[in-house]
């Protein structure tokens, strides 16, 4: 590939420019690119260019032509500043294209995961009130069964049949103010119905701005994004790649085997994904091809389990004295849609370095992070409390839901819905989601922390989920484990509880082997523990006196 790499001095100038934001980052990238005609965007699922030809590779100039053509198409539909347009098709490079096209008009893309159930999509659209819905033919057929023409007055169009005209002039770029909304991205829905999170022009850029000046890459770098392309985190990484001039490959299939194969095919040096995808990559056979050039793994959103991190950093390579050396770096960027792009806490792992269980690292320079008691007062070091965040990356709120927005704030901090503690070195440690902590007669069981311990101490466990279950009318915690071939659960419960007891944690009541396919996950790949609670808990309720006073649907 020709070199599109943007030098450090130019990146620093971009980062210092207050006019660059989420709504015009693409135009800024076009201005500073060393070669807008060099291949830049690689699409696992081909997209139609401005002339209707299916393409799996586009330069920035070709991407600009396509974005301009779609902007003209939307303008022809009467779409203008502040209008929302729903975007609902199979996750692909098309999500980025339509986000950029709508941003050029000052309109707001409402990105929707292509696997979301049509009935939930409709409820989401009714909350965000778009003027139109852009789909593909498959989703158009799905939506036809739920749309009610007398109530749902927005237009519906399919990218598979829409015709782009080269004769229509491209509208000039909209001039965004700092607070202008540019994107509505939904939460994963693991705690209930997905919530519409607002990202604004300047707010969206704050995390990108910080990472732009310290992005560890080089002229041979290539980013493979295995994030859901409809997710705000994916759009943020797309913009970072454009402003950095680092070629970008976008995945639609986020399975571990597909991502590993694509990493080899594209020569990826940086692989970005949610923890679920990176866990699958960690479990790939050690001789699986495709991962030998990877220098950095980046986990976005929920923190990854250290057992999976340890396996990944043994793969790939890094550079020492100009020579490639086995072993790579893992960057864990903890955050959520509401906390904005870039991860508010960060931890870097390299081979031979072991962090404490569920350590999230230290706050990013753009975030003020605190551990709060339910009354809003700060917790002491070592005391488990509510994770709260202030800073320029935090969302302005939920679209059309002021009540939920204000209920998500405590003492000026946005509550993520996570339980954490801070140590004396100001490192933050994650123990659970508020809604997933299990109140048993024997004590509190933090499900995520317990999963971390099981993976660290029982190597025959590939992955596991700890959930609440009812037994004789009493709530207890059980582990559902996915085991390596040739292993069973005989005697495992006693071993697990011996480890937990030695670490001062509440024991489990049972351990059950399960297949990965039997564990329900949401559209972004996150485990739906609420559904598992319904399966195993029956009518069980938390023990009295242990309720945590925060909304049940906060955060993700």
Image (cartoon, rainbow, N blue to C red):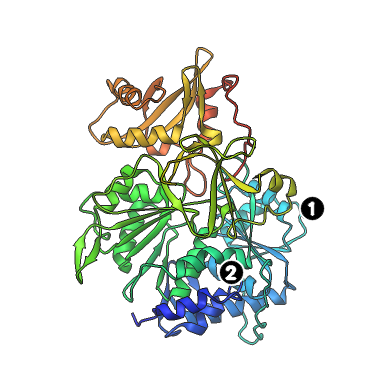
Vertical relation: 499 (above or below) 356: above
**Residue 419 left/right relative to 350:** right
Count of marks overlaid on the render: 2
Residue density around tag 2, few if under 14, some if 14–19, many if 20 or more, within 10 Å: many
Residue farthest to the top? Answer: 472
Label ID, residue 22: 2
Q: Is residue 40 visible?
A: yes
| Pair 2/1: label in front | 2
Residue 447 position by quadrant: top left
Vertical relation: 142 (above or below) 492: below
**Residue 67 left/right relative to 290:** right
Residue density around tag 1, few if under 14, some if 14–19, many if 20 or more, within 10 Å: few
Q: Position of residue 261 (x, y in %)?
A: 31, 60
Residue 292 position by quadrant: bottom left
Which residue occupies 63% across, 71% down?
103
Quadrant in the picture for the C terminus: top right
Vertical relation: 238 (above or below) 492: below
Q: CA distance from mark 2 to mark 1?
A: 33 Å
Q: Is residue 93 visible?
A: no
Residue 37 position by quadrant: bottom left
Nearest the camera: 456 or 85? 456
Q: Position of residue 313 (x, y in %)?
A: 28, 53
Which residue occupies 60% across, 80% down?
68
Nearest the camera: 548 or 338? 548
Label ID, residue 151: 1
Q: Position of residue 479 (x, y in %)?
A: 40, 28
Question: What element does badge 1 sit on?
Answer: loop
Quadrant in the picture for the N terminus: bottom left
Vertical relation: 524 (above or below) 64: above
Question: What element does badge 2 sit on?
Answer: loop
Residue farthest to the right? Answer: 150
């Amino acid at each position: 590939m020709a070199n599109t790499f943007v030098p450090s001095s130019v990146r620093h100038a971009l980062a210092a420019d207050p006019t660059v934001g989420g709504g015009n980052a693409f135009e800024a990238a076009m201005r500073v690119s060393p070669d807008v005609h060099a291949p830049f965007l690689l699409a696992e699922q081909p997209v139609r260019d401005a002339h209707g030809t299916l393409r799996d590779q586009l330069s920035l100039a070709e991407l600009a032509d396509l974005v301009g053509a779609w902007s003209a198409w939307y303008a022809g539909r009467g779409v203008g500043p502040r209008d929302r347009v729903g975007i609902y098709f199979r996750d692909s490079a098309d999500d980025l294209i339509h986000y950029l096209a709508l941003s050029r008009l000052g309109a707001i893309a409402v990105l929707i995961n292509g696997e979301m159930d049509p009935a939930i999509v409709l409820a989401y659209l009714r909350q965000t009130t778009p003027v139109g819905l852009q789909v593909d033919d498959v989703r158009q057929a799905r939506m036809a069964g739920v749309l009610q023409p007398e109530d749902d007055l927005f237009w519906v169009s399919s990218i598979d049949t829409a015709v782009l005209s080269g004769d229509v002039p491209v509208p000039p770029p909209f001039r965004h103010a700092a607070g202008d909304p540019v994107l509505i991205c939904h939460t994963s829905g693991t705690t209930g119905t997905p919530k519409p999170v607002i990202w604004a022009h300047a707010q969206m850029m704050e995390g990108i701005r910080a990472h732009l000046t310290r992005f560890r890459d080089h002229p041979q770098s290539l980013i493979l994004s295995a994030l859901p392309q409809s997710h705000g985190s994916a759009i943020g990484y797309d913009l970072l790649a454009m402003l950095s001039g680092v070629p970008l490959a976008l995945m639609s299939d986020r399975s571990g085997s597909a991502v590993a194969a694509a990493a080899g095919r594209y020569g990826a040096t940086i692989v970005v994904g949610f923890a679920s995808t990176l866990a699958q990559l960690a479990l790939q056979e050690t001789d699986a091809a495709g991962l030998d050039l990877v220098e950095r793994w980046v986990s976005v959103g929920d923190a990854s389990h250290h057992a999976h991190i340890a396996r990944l950093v043994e793969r790939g390579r890094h550079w020492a004295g100009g020579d490639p050396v086995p072993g790579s770096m893992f960057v864990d960027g903890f955050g959520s849609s509401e906390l904005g792009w870039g991860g508010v806490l960060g931890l870097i792992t390299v081979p031979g370095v072991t962090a404490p269980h569920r350590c999230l690292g230290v706050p990013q320079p753009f975030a003020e992070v605190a551990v709060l008691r339910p009354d809003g007062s700060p917790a002491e070091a070592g005391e488990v409390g509510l994770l709260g965040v202030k800073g320029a990356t935090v969302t302005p709120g939920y679209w059309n839901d002021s009540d939920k927005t204000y209920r998500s704030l405590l003492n000026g901090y946005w509550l993520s819905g996570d339980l954490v503690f801070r140590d004396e070195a100001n490192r933050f440690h994650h123990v659970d989601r508020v809604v997933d902590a299990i109140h048993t007669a024997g004590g509190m069981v933090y499900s995520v922390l317990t999963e971390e311990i099981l993976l660290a101490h029982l190597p025959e466990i590939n992955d596991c989920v700890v959930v609440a279950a009812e037994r004789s009318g009493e709530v207890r915690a059980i582990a559902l484990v996915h085991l390596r071939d040739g292993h069973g659960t005989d005697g495992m419960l006693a071993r697990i509880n011996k480890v937990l007891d030695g670490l001062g944690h509440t024991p489990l009541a049972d351990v059950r082997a399960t297949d990965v396919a039997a564990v329900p996950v949401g559209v972004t790949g996150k485990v739906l523990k609420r559904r598992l609670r319904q399966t195993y808990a029956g009518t069980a309720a938390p023990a009295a006196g242990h309720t945590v006073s925060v909304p049940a649907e906060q955060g993700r």
